[in-house]
Image: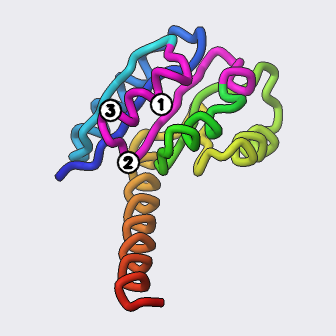
Amino acid sequence: MATKVVLGVIGSDAHVVGITILEQALEASGFDVVNLGVQTSQEEFVEAATAHDADAVLVSSLYGHAKQDCEGFHERLAEADLDVVTYIGGNLAVGQDDFEETRQFFRELGFDRVFDSETDPEDAILALQKDLDMRSSEDERERERVSAGM
């Protein structure tokens, strides 16, 4: 069964090219992709992730207002009882001088990985495969521990 990924551009952002390229690269790598398109609300991400039993949610933002658009995003995922890998990428902050500060901000919001707008889609896909494999291994170890009565 293919890994399911929900992908979209959050908030009022209408930049579609990046997620279209990412969608094609993900599909070429064997992922089952649900592309929500542009101007996607947090609620739409949560609804799609729930409806499609997603393994990962990938958020894109290029207009520089992702900090505002993503406040409370992980709380909404938790309220929906979703345990998914979350990535965000793009031009995430207006006047972004030090991307490491931006990366730290989004990591503190709960994103597993944070990418700048220059990231090669293949690098993001390799990271996603690694993170999903690691999560799958952790889940398997937990199932073994529970079945052993620990």
Q: Position of residue 141 (x, y in %)?
A: 41, 80
Which is nearer the N-term, disc 1 or disc 2?
A: 1
**Residue linked to disc 2:** 55
* Amino acid marked by disc 2: Asp
Q: Is residue 93 left or right of residue 35?
A: right
Q: Are marks 1 and 2 in contact (CB under 8 Å)?
A: no
For this view, does 101 lie left or right of residue 75?
A: right
Judging depth in this view, the residue of 74 and 121 nearest the camera is 74
Q: Residue at 67% of width from left, 24% of height from top?
A: 66
Is 89 above or below relative to 126? above
Residue labelled with disc 3: 51
Q: Residues within 10 Å of mark 2 (few under 14, many from 20)?
A: many
Q: Earlier in the sequence, mark 1 or mark 3?
A: 1
Nearer to me, 7 or 78: 78
**Residue found at x 38% / y 20%:** 36
Q: From the viewer's perspective, is residue 133 above or below residue 149?
A: above
Q: Position of residue 12 (x, y in %)?
A: 59, 9
* Residue 66 lies in the magenta-colored region: yes
- Mark 1 burial class by Cα count in 10 Å: few <14, some 14-19, many 20+: many
Viewer-side residue, 92 vs 110: 110
Give the side of residue 40 with respect to residue 30, left or right.
right
Q: Which residue is mark 1?
A: 46
Residue 91 location (% of width, % of height) = 65, 25
Alpha-carbon distance for marks 1 and 3? 9 Å
Numbered range of the magenta stretch:
40-69
Question: Circle 2 — which element?
Answer: loop
Query: Callout 3, which amino acid?
Result: Ala
Label pair 1/3, CB-CB below 8 angstroms: no
Query: In 3D space, how far apart are the residues under numbered discs 1 and 2 (Cα atoms)?
Result: 12 Å
Check disc 1 and give the amino acid type: Val
